[in-house]
Each structure stands twice: as C-alpha cells, then as structure tokens.
Amino acid sequence: MKRKKLAIAVVVAAIVISVIWALKKGDLSSIENIEELGKVLGFVTLIPTLLTVILAFITNNVVFSLLMGFLSGVILLTVTGCNSFSGIPSELVSQTYTSFVNVLGDTENLEIMLLCFVVGGMIEVVRYSGGFESLAVKLSERVSTPRKAGLITSMLGCMIFFDDYANALIVGPVMKPIMDRLHVSREKLSYIVDSTAAPVTGIAIVSSWVAVEISSIEKGLEIAGMTGNGFPMFISSIPFTFYCLFCLGFIFLNSLVGRDFGPMLKAERRARKEGNKNTDSSEKLIVKDRMTQRIISGVGSIAFMVILSIILFYITGKKTAVALGLLPANAPFTFETVVTAISNANTVRLIITSTILASIIAVVSGVALKLFNLKEALKSWFDGAKNLFSTIVMLTLAWCLADTIGRLGTTFFAIEIISGNIPYIYVPLLIFVCCCIVSFASGSYGCLFVVMPLTIPLAYRMIEVGAITNSEIYLSICIASVMAGSIFGDHCSPVTDCTILSAMGSGCETMDHVKTQLPYAMVVAVVSCLAILMVSFGLSVALALIIGLAIEVTVLYVFGRKPI
C-alpha cells in the first residue's frame, strides 16, 4: 500500500510541476523547432523519462511506469501546444493520437512486432516438441557447471552478432533449460543475453546497426563541412568503444571467477538453493528421441540461414548485389561496399523470413515424425505468439514514450546542460557521459541520430583550437564515445526495447533484470570512463584495455562472493 501511495504521489507531483513550469513559460504553441522547444522548456523535458524510471523501481510494473511517463509527456506537449484552456481536451487527444500514429505507422516498429510474434510462435513449437530439451541434453554433455554454462551462453551471444533483437530472442530460450538444471538464475541469463546483444551488434562490421552508425557519422561530416566516408571512421573507432569491449570482458570474467555482488549475488544464491521460481512448466517435457529432437529443433535455422545468405552474397558477387538492389550497377565490389550493402539490408525482415521457414520446418518435421498432429502444432504456434502480447504492449509504450520525448526536445536540452566550455582533453569523456544519459532516456538510435552529427563538428573544432598531436585518434575516440554511450542506455534502461526483449527471452521479469544488471553495467561504465581518460591523455589503447580488465577482475574479487 505504501508503494502504491508513493507512486500516485510521484505521478501527481510530476504532472503538476510540468504543467506549472510550462504555463510559466507562456504560449509556446508558435515554436515549431524541436531543438528550440527543448531549450525553452528546460528541465521539465526530463520529467517523463525520470518519472518512468522512478515508477519502475517503486512499483516493479514496467507497463504502468511506461504508461504514466508517456501520459506525462503528452500532457506537457498539450500544455505547450495549446494557447487556451478550452482547447486542452482536443489537443490532449491529438497529441496522444499523433504518438500512436508515429509509432504504429513506422514500418520498422511494425516489423519488430511481427518479429516478436513469429519468434514466439516458433519457440513454442520447438518447445512443445521437446526441441529445447534435446538441445539442452546435447549441450549438457559438455556443460556441467554454472561456469561452463555462463561461458557457453556468452560465446553463443557473441556468435549471433548480426542483430541484437535476434540475439535476445534466440539465446535466452536455448539456454534456459540448461541454466535451470544447473540452478543458475534467470537474472544471470538475461544479463549475459543483454550484454551480448547491443554491445556485440554495435561494433560488428556486419549488423543491423552499422548502416545507422555510418549514416550518422557521414551526417556529422556534412555538418562539419568535411568530405569523407563514414565506413573507415567507423572501423577505426571500434578499438575505442570501451563500454562494449569491457562489457564483453566483464561477462566472461564473471563466469570464469564465479563471483557476484549486489542484487545478482542474491539472485544467484536463491537459484542455487531453490531453483528458478519462474521456471516454465512447458520446459519440463520428456525428451523422446534425442536425434529426432535435434532434427526438428528449428532454432539453429535462423542463425544458419542468415549466415548462409551472407556467405552466398559474397560468393555470387556483384551481380547478385545489384539484382537485389543493395549496390548500384557502377559501384565497385570491394570489402567496404559489400559490408555496407549487407548492413543496409533489412536484417529484421530477413530474420522474420528465416523464422517463418524455421517454424514450417519444425511443424512439418514434427507431424511427419508423429510427434504431434497439425492441429496441435498450429495451436502451439499461436499460443507462443499470443504469449508475447504483453511484450508488444511494453514495446509500443516504450516507443510512444521515446516519440514524446523526441517531440519535447529532451535530447537537445540534455546535451546543452552537459556540454560547455571545457578543455579538449575531457571532451571524449563528456560525450560518453552525455550519451549514456541521453540513450538511457531516449534509446540508442535516437542518441546516435542526434548526438553523432553534433559530436563530429565539435571534435573538429577542438582539433583546430587544441594542442592535439594525433587528430585521427582524437576523432576516433569521440566517435567511439557516442557509439558506446548510446549502447549503455539501450543496455541498461528499463524503458528500451532490447532490455525488455532480453528479459522476456530469458524468462525473467524486466525489473528483476534491470535491478540485477545495473550495478554491473555501472562498474563497466566507470571503467570505460577511466579508459577514455587514459587514451585522451596519450596512453595506448592496448594498455588502457589491459588496465580496465585488471580493474574489473579486482572488483569481482574484492566485492564479489561465491553464490555457494
């Protein structure tokens, strides 16, 4: 009851403060520029995000928190966009409608929803047939301890590098039976899955992220009045994406030393003693014929088909690329153009197609081998798709919140209050911190699109006025700071899609995942800040990485404890 009253008080206070502050600013309905609106409104543009995060921790209810954050943003937009009290009701409906239209009218969002449904259906068919049990039996021949399970999960996550959504929706269901058998918590599984999703995809040269990163870099070059190709700059920045690299290092070190701290340690001790409280009964199916189950397990078909398509793309060469519309006819068929072309391809659509085919393979094989009939298979598929409806609701609300935040100009205000007249040596660190905050509030893509074009001109200006000996390295550090900081928010925030999907795929409550993961992510973020400072002051990147990993090991041994 106390939590409920506190949540209501927080919501009322946030809305009242927002309305009073907006009214104090006067009539803002004539402001059409989002950047100007964000700067005029000031700190209240942060209220929808702060309200959502605070409520999520108070109530443990992500859907309610997202809804309240979204509504507070809509109310703020209504007050700023309306020049009379009589027009508030219609403006409130209009702003709400606009957000939902923007979200549901976005093709990429609809494809992600469809991806959730088809993956949910496929997972349930494979689960119903005992396919996951079979895969677990096969892997269990080698995975006999929590340490090995953590390492295998980490390696599997790194292997599915082409898309963070695919990683979240594939690795979790595959490893759940094994983690449950070894009494490893679902919180630990979701942490590993999340830490090998965006942090891997964000620095992979063939992924669904590359096109976004390259285009944002080239936009920054255009604003700076420079000519250049974004691809080489992206490649040169990868060694400096410290958050991604240290995040991967931490999950492997954590599995190797077998020590945890904070909420994760409590979750691991609970799992060792009691098992996972939210284990699905459907995962306790009897394995029939091991060979048969391995044949019909369609999970591997997804990664296999995506990787096969990439290999075929290389083999068949330029004619296929041109025929598919991925390369213009006069483009050179080089490594750079091929990687860029593949990255520009619709990865989500490819995964949807592969998943549907994997579902068909699982259904046809199961029926042919008399493991179930067609009616049972179809019912299982639709049950699996239906089970992800709550996830779709969370994603929709998260996107609506992001859309509202974007229309309030929150990102521009956050950048303005963080940036200022500072020495050039601290600019990369400030960029990273800025992007951590912005991406936590608005997601990774929004941060990349907004901050990267502002960062590159800033870096060039610092190169011109500062005593910088190696301008190329300095520019790479600045670009990498945007990329890594953007991934931090996508990785940690309870209101971002990848966090929600990682928890769902691992069978873990979203807030349980956030609370146990956040201390680890903060350790990695602090180590990343130190590494950025070290290379900014002239230390080699290799030495910075070694020192950073040494700090992570020290943290695990000093603060960590064995679960048993």
Image (cartoon, rainbow, N blue to C red):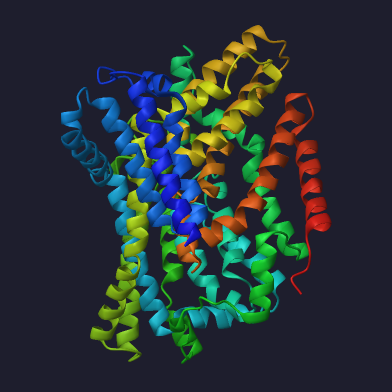
Q: Left or right: where does residue 354 sit relative to residue 373?
A: right
Q: Is residue 340 visible?
A: no
Give the residue at x 48% y 89%: 287
Instruction: Judge by depth and name the residue closer to the eye, 442 or 322.
Output: 442
Q: Left or right: where does residue 338 sit relative to residue 91?
A: right
Q: Is residue 459 above or below residue 337?
A: above
Instruction: Judge by depth and name the residue closer to the eye, 86 or 251.
Output: 86
Q: Is residue 528 visible?
A: yes
Q: Is residue 558 above or below residue 447?
A: below
Location of residue 460 (image quadrant): top right
Q: Is residue 373 above or below residue 95?
A: below
Q: Left or right: where does residue 74 sit relative to residue 480?
A: left
Give the residue at x 61% y 59%: 516
Location of residue 378 (image quadrant): bottom left
Q: Quadrant of the C terminus?
A: bottom right
Q: Is residue 274 above or below residue 111?
A: below
Total residue callouts: 0
- Measured as percent of width and height from the top left, residue 31 is found at 29, 18
Give the residue at x 77% y 30%: 534
- Measured as percent of width and height from the top left, residue 91 is found at 19, 33
Instruction: Judge by depth and name the residue closer to the eye, 125 or 404.
Output: 404
- Measured as percent of width and height from the top left, residue 310 is found at 44, 52
Give the residue at x 41% y 61%: 305
- Measured as percent of width and height from the top left, residue 132 is found at 48, 78
